[in-house]
Amino acid sequence: MAWIEVHQSLPRHRKVVSAGNLLDVPRMSIIGHMICLWTWALDNAPSGELTGISPPVIASGAEWTGDSGAFVNALIQVGFLDQTADRLQIHNWNDYAGKLIARRTSDRERKRAQRMSAGN
């Protein structure tokens, strides 16, 4: 089981309001799409790196059924995604998911060591 940190300020955060306005959807829809994107990323882009992942795949991960390019562009414009010339990543991903990812890595290594010692 995994969880991701969601802050109480999210429903009224300027990024949520701005993305809702850009995409012409309610704030609660943006929150749902972002939570879907974040939880999808835990399994599919655990470093938060989205470079090379197409907008349709990103939108699908977020359960967005509209124009995938518009969705990704809106998330870049409001700051949910960071884009440079050669990279696309989830903004501050390590700050929010880093502990979970580190724990998963540690658990995986611990289990591997247990299997190795059990086989001896």
Image (spheres, grey):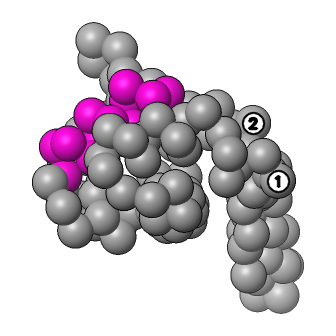
Task: From the viewer's side, name the closer residue of 78 and 1.
Answer: 78
Q: Secondary structure at mark 1?
A: loop
Instruction: Please count the marks in the image.
Output: 2
Q: Position of residue 10 (x, y in %)?
A: 70, 49
Compared to 116, does 94 lie above or below?
above
Q: Is residue 91 visible?
A: yes
> Which residue is drawn at the image coordinates 27% and 12% (left, top)?
85
Compared to 119, does 80 lie above or below?
above
Report whether 87 appears left or right of 56.
right
Q: Earlier in the sequence, mark 2 or mark 1?
A: 1
Residue that numbered label 1 is attached to: 8
Q: Position of residue 118 (x, y in %)?
A: 83, 87
Q: Secondary structure at mark 2?
A: helix
Report whether 62 appears left or right of 42.
left
> Label 2 vs label 1: CA separation?
16 Å
> Which residue is drawn at the image coordinates 31% and 50% (left, top)?
24
Residue that numbered label 2 is attached to: 95
Compared to 109, does 91 lie above or below?
above
Please name the predominant secondary structure of the magenta segment in the image: helix
Q: Position of residue 30 (x, y in %)?
A: 47, 56
